[in-house]
Image (tube, rainbow, N blue to C red):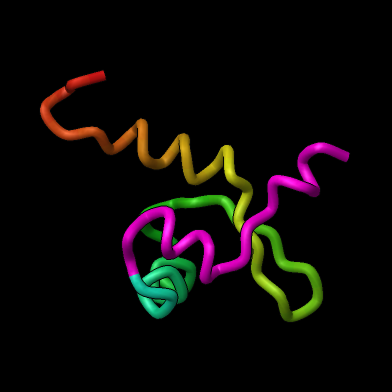
Amino acid sequence: MKELNDLLTAVAAAQKLNVSVRTLANWRTRGWPKIEYVKIGRCVRYRRSALETYIIDNIANGAR
């Protein structure tokens, strides 16, 4: 049940990634970059862990 509490709206996900909601929609349409999302009816939600994984995987200069 914890994972359900970690679902973010597209607006919250966009704020976390510092991009626009439209950019997230474009990424979903193109399938790149690949960020997992969940569709509940017509609503799109992002797992907090998927966003954090995306951020970690895209750290520049191998600074991990």
Residue at x-position 58% and y-position 38%: 49
Residue range of the region highlighted in magenta in the rendering: 1-19
Residue at x-position 55% and y-position 68%: 10
Q: Looking at the picture, how far across and down is residue 40, in whole percent?
A: 79, 69
Magenta segment, prevailing SS (helix, strand or loop): helix
Residue at x-position 77% and y-position 47%: 5
Q: Looking at the picture, how far across and down is residue 41, in whole percent?
A: 80, 76
Q: Quadrant of the C terminus?
A: top left
Residue furthest right in the image: 1
Residue at x-position 48% and y-position 51%: 35
Q: 21 above or below 2?
A: below
Residue 18 or residue 50, whichever sits in front: 18
Q: Is residue 38 left or right of residue 29?
A: right
Q: Quadrant of the N terminus?
A: top right
Q: 46 above or below 60?
A: below
Q: Looking at the picture, how far across and down is residue 29, in whole percent?
A: 46, 74
Residue 3 falls within the magenta-colored stretch: yes
Residue 64 falls within the magenta-colored stretch: no
Residue 32: name its quadrant.
bottom left
Q: Is residue 60 left or right of residue 39?
A: left
